[in-house]
Image: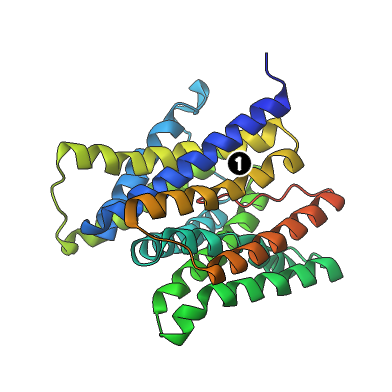
Amino acid sequence: MLSKNQLGFFYMFISVCAFSLMDVIVKWSEDYPVGQVLFFRGFCGIIPILFLIPKDRYLDFYKTTRPFLHFKRCLAGLIALVSIFIALRNLPLATVVSITFAAPIFTTIFSIFLLNEKVGLYRWLAVLVGFVGIIIISEPGFSSLNLYYIYPIIFCLGLSYVAIAIRKLSSTEPVWLISFFFSFSIMLLSFLSFYQNWILPSLIDLFLLSLIGILGGLANLWLSQSYKLSEVSLVTPLKYLALVFAIIFGYFIWDELPTFKTLLGAGLVILSSFIIFRRELVLKKRLSVSRHE
């Protein structure tokens, strides 16, 4: 029988694997309009959530006392999701994943203004180190005016507000309701893109596109379960396996090899987020930044 920490470790590992595989499929789906891919992310992402709704809430599961906060969370999440989809299609996989590790940096900044938190010297230094890492990773984009490097940063900004909003929502709202509203909002947004001439997918493509939603939905639920079962300090470092997976997939599928600058910048960003994470533990906070939550 596995201990709670071992189960949490396992859930974090399969969550990282699911997110990594989802990123690969999103990058592969470049022949399909972004709106069509969003539809599959939203519609199929609802499927795992339906199994979590309590039987006594089947008729009124959608009711909430905090609709405006849900709206703001969904809006920030949609901005982040569209940005990461565009980035994955136009930049090397390892580059995108490296920059997304900077989300805790922006969360730290937002927490000052939205949660009135005090940030000490250690976390300010971590923020500075993180920004240096982002600049090093994005330098090729700045020099060649490649605007696609902006999208992973927009993703981090959106995801950082999402982390703040979920922290507030979690005090009264169940995880499955927060996830349901987000997936449903993705599906609604996708309907605005019919003009993009959606493509009728083959059976294989239909399966892969559906996996985007199912993997995204499951990955977020597994991530939440990991934090619930185990010590945060034990499982959080596993999130950085995503960079290893991105390098492997990027090389073998798209012949992408990360540059020294990308690896150096990624190292600084990971160091920055790790310092912030350690300070959160010292201050006895459990702030987690989920990929698409």
Q: According to the image, what is the colour scheme of the structure?
A: rainbow
Look at the picture and state if 78 lies above or below 234.
Answer: below
Q: Identify which residue is drawn at 45% across, 79% down.
A: 141
Look at the picture and state if 140 lies above or below 170.
Answer: below
Say if residue 177 shows up in the picture. no
Image coordinates of residue 168 in percent, x first then y, are 67, 52
Image side of residue 111 versus residue 196, left or right: right
Q: Amino acid at mark 1?
A: Glu
Q: Identify which residue is drawn at 49% across, 47% down.
A: 245
Element marked by disc 1? loop
Image coordinates of residue 247 in percent, x first then y, are 47, 54
The front one of 178 and 268 is 268
Determine the residue located farthest toward the top in the rendered image. Answer: 1
Q: Check the picture and name the quadrant holding the N terminus.
A: top right
The residue that disc 1 covers is 173
Q: For the residue carrying disc 1, how many other residues have a C-alpha within 10 Å: few (<14), some (14-19), or many (20+)?
A: some
Image coordinates of residue 199 in percent, x first then y, are 14, 53
Image side of residue 253 versus residue 94, left or right: left
Image coordinates of residue 197 in percent, x first then y, are 14, 60
Q: Identify which residue is drawn at 16% across, 45% down.
A: 201
Number of on-image labels: 1
The front one of 183 and 19 is 19
Say if residue 204 shows up in the picture. yes
The front one of 286 and 262 is 262
The front one of 42 and 6 is 6
Image side of residue 232 versus residue 238, left or right: right
Look at the picture and state if 90 lies above or below 77.
Answer: below
Tell me which corner region of the image, top left, top right, bottom left or bottom right, holds residue 233: top right
